[in-house]
Image (cartoon, rainbow, N blue to C red):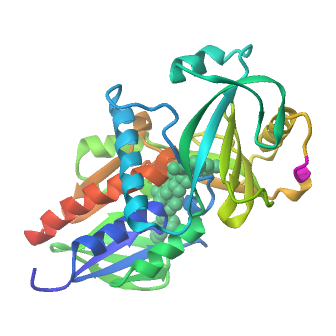
Amino acid sequence: MKTTKTIVIVGNGVAAWRVNAQLEKKFIDLNIIRIGSEDFAPKCSYRTTAINCLRGVQKGISNLGDLMYDSHLEFESFFESEAPDGVNVAHEWQFWDPEGQNAQKWQRRFGQWEEFNKIGQFNFTRKMHGVCSKAYIIEPKKLYQWHVDQFKNSQFMDDYVKEITLDGPSHIVKTQKGAQIKADAIVICTGYLAQNFSELVDDEKIADYLKRSKPVRGTYLGTEFDLGPQSFSYALESKHLIYRSSDKTLLIGSTSENDSAIQVPMEKEVNEIFEYVKSQFTHWDLPPRVDWPTHHGIRFKGAKRTPFWGKLSKGSYGVIGLYKNAFSFSFLAAKELCDVIYEDLAQDI
Ligand SMILES: Cc1cc2nc3c(=O)[nH]c(=O)nc-3n(C[C@H](O)[C@H](O)[C@H](O)COP(=O)(O)OP(=O)(O)OC[C@H]3O[C@@H](n4cnc5c(N)ncnc54)[C@H](O)[C@@H]3O)c2cc1C
């Protein structure tokens, strides 16, 4: 390619960071502009428990399972080759009550398990069954800073895109603060706000997918607490107690409400999770509820729980519906999508 191309990434969450990183890897000469706005659209990627763990997912059972598996491997290969900041290597223990109503579900999922009376420094109030899996516990702000430090041909604009129009083969991106950018390609990485850009989609199937995708709000608690150098995640049925050693943070969560983009935290439900987690152990030397600030984010669940990445129309692309696997899906998504963008730009779109 002879002239320098401009690519605008709309969004500044994990999908956007990964697309930006892959674009820089694929193209030597590219002007990349990433736009996001914490004022108008707070990113879910800073309001998340951000764990990568396969939790018994195996290859060859379903298309979604295969995608989760392949994305997890892609993340692991990134982690091993690039040693980024903000990733804690850990284990997740999935526990369940052998007498509980979900026992059979967990037994079917994992096949094998062990008996536990205690885990780490915590003694259970009754015997539990559990399975240990490798996990990665991510500190999103550190992972973002690591990405920014790697970027060479990219700039970030703290702004909100209010309109995208066509101008011949280019797109004109107009922002709230008055910028107008002529882009050779645009990539929509706007999390639960992807539907704002549905006019870009010219494929009926993708338009239908976008229409059937839903926001899912979620609340969790976090507190600073030093439990040593080893990160962990204890999943008590479907409620988590997570320790992130890189910033000495404990998390408890999370709630989930389908089809809701309400930005108000789910206080009652998250208090119930706190009490449940506390009740599982014979003693509780961790901080009282009052010392755990509440955090709240909006996920975007793709139709059939499946993510989408690919072309929306000529010159526009998207990474959509990453839901609860964003910190692994985004790695495979960015790699595959940037191959498509590269091919298109090589033919001058
Ligand atoms: C409680 C909770 C727990 C979770 N736990 C996990 C977990 O354990 N593992 C996991 O992988 N995932 C988890 N998730 C999900 C994960 O955090 C999200 O799926 C992920 O952060 C979404 O990333 P994204 O880049 O697609 O969107 P976001 O991070 O939401 O980023 C969207 C970006 O788009 C920008 N934007 C939107 N509209 C515009 C516009 N018009 N102009 C400019 N910018 C715009 C926003 O400002 C933002 O920067 C959890 C989520 C929650 C809420």
Camera-side residue of 230 and 166: 230
Q: Provide the residue span drawn in magenta.
A: 285-289
Q: Quadrant of residue 131?
A: top right
Across the whole image, how many numbered discs are drawn on residues?
0
Relative to 200, say whether 135 is above or below. above
Q: Is residue 160 visible?
A: no
The residue positioned 70% from the left and 52% from the top of the image is: 243
- Please check the rendered image and state whether residue 237 is part of the magenta-colored stretch, yes or no: no
Vertical side of 322 occupied by 185: above or below: below
269 or 79, nearer to the observer: 79
Judged left or right of residue 269, residue 202 is: left
Rendering coords of residue 333 (x, y %): 33, 54
Residue at point 19%, 59% (across, down): 340
Q: Is residue 138 left or right of residue 225?
A: left
Residue sitting nearer the eye, 264 or 129: 129
Residue lying at 44% horizontally and 71% vertically, measured from the top left: 162
